[in-house]
Amino acid sequence: MSKNWPLWEIFVRSKNGLEHRHFGSLHAADAEMALVNARDVYTRRNEGVSIWVVESKNIIASNPEHNGEMFEPAQDKVYRHPTFYDLPDEVKHM
Amino acid sequence: MSEEQIKNPGTERSRSLEKQFEARIARDEKIEPKDWMPEKYRKTHIRQMSQHAHSEIVGMLPEGNWITRAPSLRRKVALLAKVQDEAGHGLYLYSATETLGISRDEMYEQLHTGKAKYSSIFNYPTVTWADMGAIGWLVDGAAIINQVPLCNTSYGPYARAMIRVCKEESFHQRQGYEIMMKLANGTPEQKEMAQDALNRWWWPSLMMLGPTDAESIHTEQSMKWKLKRKSNDDLRQQFIDQTVPQADLIGLTIPDPDLKWNEERQSYDFGDIDWDEFWQVVKGHGPMNKERMKARVGAWEEGEWVRDAAMAYADKKQERKEKQVV
């Protein structure tokens, strides 16, 4: 037979109040096994309180070759930042 | 346009991409999996990272040998945790390597057929309990010296994996040194056992840091890509300078009659390394090369039915779920 175990991406929340962060990936036959393997591979020293697993094929990634079209439009919009606006010095905190 | 650009626009384009790429690395930018990279960068990283992963996996075998015979429960849980860490390190590194477009199966295939190498140190036998001490202290010590600079390497997934590995590695070395210390302060027989382990592991540990700079073929390019920050000879000197006082402290003797403090260099001078032995082991003629591969391939083959059963179970569950939806 020999069908390979699919690849899963592992996200771990290191403590409540923080977001899940990408930790790495691993192979597992199904989601349940991916979860327990992720426990052993990525949280052997209390690194997490919650784990998400997502099969890698379900992640859609942007292409770095298109970073220009994708991200440059934000670069010339300085008016989105507070420092763009001139205020008198008397206004201390705003 | 120059004549060459007209004749060969493809080469010209890739040369300019390559220049930009090298400039990014020189600026300390990280390279991520989907970024453009020269084919040579991809291949070199696949080679080094997969061999690093293989070393972690094969590295479990010499120590696994002693788990059932550890002298106390304290030693047993520590050794078990260390070997489990090595499995973890292998897995971090395999998955980081997969981001370069090679499958896990291809990597296993390369290891099992002998096409890919792993660290030659694991081809030496572990004949006494003191070898667990010597491995943690010396082999993991040398590994740390090799690995710390890699936390800053240019390929993002490799650097991230190495940060995690380095964080976990220091426990390995400390548990090894503690074993050596206890034996060295024990009965005369125990001390002799510790000394004997040091005698056997010292030279292979020095060799583990790689051939001399004059013979190291990959150094220059690897420095540029930050796959290497210091030369093999510099790393070796660092390892010796750091380890000799640790041996003195527990009353063990480094098995090198030429070892001597050099006041002028503020470093230890040391004797000649038997590089013939190193190359023999690399070429597969070390004391345990065959045994290690037999154990590794055996584990893979005997596990096949388990992997297949898990996959069949997952498929069946999935089918059942789909039927219920209909």
Image: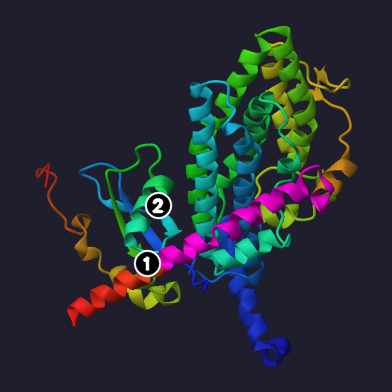
Main secondary structure type of the part rendered in magenta: helix
Query: Could you tell me the amino acid type at mark 2?
Result: Asn
Residue B97 point in image, percent of width and height: 55, 60
Determine if residue A60 is in view. Answer: no
Frontmost of labels 1 and 2 is 1
Report the residue at 64% width, 27% height from top: B137
Nearest the camera: B15 or B287? B287
Report the residue at 65% width, 15% height from top: B183
Circles 1 and 2: CB atoms closer than 8 Å: no
Return the residue at label 2.
Answer: A37
Please report the bounds of the magenta region as a residue range.
Answer: B282-311
Q: Secondary structure at mark 2?
A: helix
Mark 2 residue crowding within 10 angstroms, few (<14) / some (14–19) / many (20+): some
Determine the chain carrying the residue at label 2: A
Residue B94 point in image, percent of width and height: 54, 57
The answer to whether residue B191 is above or below residue B12 is above
Look at the image and say whether residue B38 sits in the magenta stretch.
no
Q: Secondary structure at mark 1?
A: helix
Q: Left or right of A52: which side holds B154?
A: right
Residue B163 point in image, percent of width and height: 49, 44
The answer to whether residue B18 is above or below residue A49 is below
Query: Could you tell me the amino acid type at mark 1?
Result: Tyr
Residue A64 point in image, percent of width and height: 43, 72
Q: Quadrant of residue A6?
A: bottom left
Return the residue at label 1.
Answer: B313
